[in-house]
Image (spheres, rainbow, N blue to C red):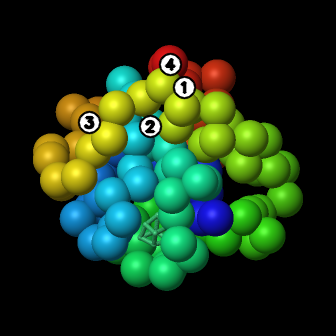
Amino acid sequence: AYVVTDACIKCKYTDCVDVCPVDCFREGPNFLAIDPDECIDCALCVPECPVEAIYAEDDVPAGQEVFVALNAELSRTWPAITQKKAPLPDHAQWAAVKGKLPHLER
Ligand code: SF4
Ligand code: F3S
């Protein structure tokens, strides 16, 4: 499955959800997760993300491996999101920040 990683936190641009053919994105307060049981590995979402937050499970950058389990866990309870909407208000100031996991809201 594909995995949403650190860069999405506090930005949540949502460009990714419009292209997913199986609607497997799930929405939390300041992050999206991909349901690994639904993702068909089409990779269409990868180039849509302005902050390059989405990776194949086997290709997640070093230090971000925790996001594989987090996507699986969070997608179990978060609701589906299937249409793009406005990013979070402070997206611009957070887009280039690294290590945002402490800011993840559930
Ligand atoms: Fe959806 Fe394809 Fe991205 Fe998986 S890889 S989340 S199926 S768009
Ligand atoms: Fe997040 Fe990128 Fe989608 S910031 S909401 S993974 S477009």
For disc 4, the marked residue is 106
Q: CA distance from mark 1 to mark 2?
A: 7 Å
Label 4–label 2 contact, CB within 8 A: no
Question: Looking at this view, is 33 or 41 the one in front?
Answer: 41
| In the image, the residue with mark 3 has its CB under 8 Å from the nearest atom of ligand 2 | no
- Identify residue type, mark 4: Arg
- Is 43 on the left or on the right of 101, as rendered? left
Label 1–label 2 contact, CB within 8 A: yes
Quadrant containing the N terminus is: bottom right
Q: Residue at x 42, y 29 (%)?
A: 78
- Identify residue type, mark 1: Leu
Residue 3, given in percent of the width and then of the height, sits at 61, 57
Q: Earlier in the sequence, mark 4 or mark 3?
A: 3
Q: Is residue 30 above or below residue 95?
A: above
Q: Residue furthest top?
A: 106
| In the image, the residue with mark 2 has its CB under 8 Å from the nearest atom of ligand 2 | yes
Q: Earlier in the sequence, mark 2 or mark 3?
A: 2
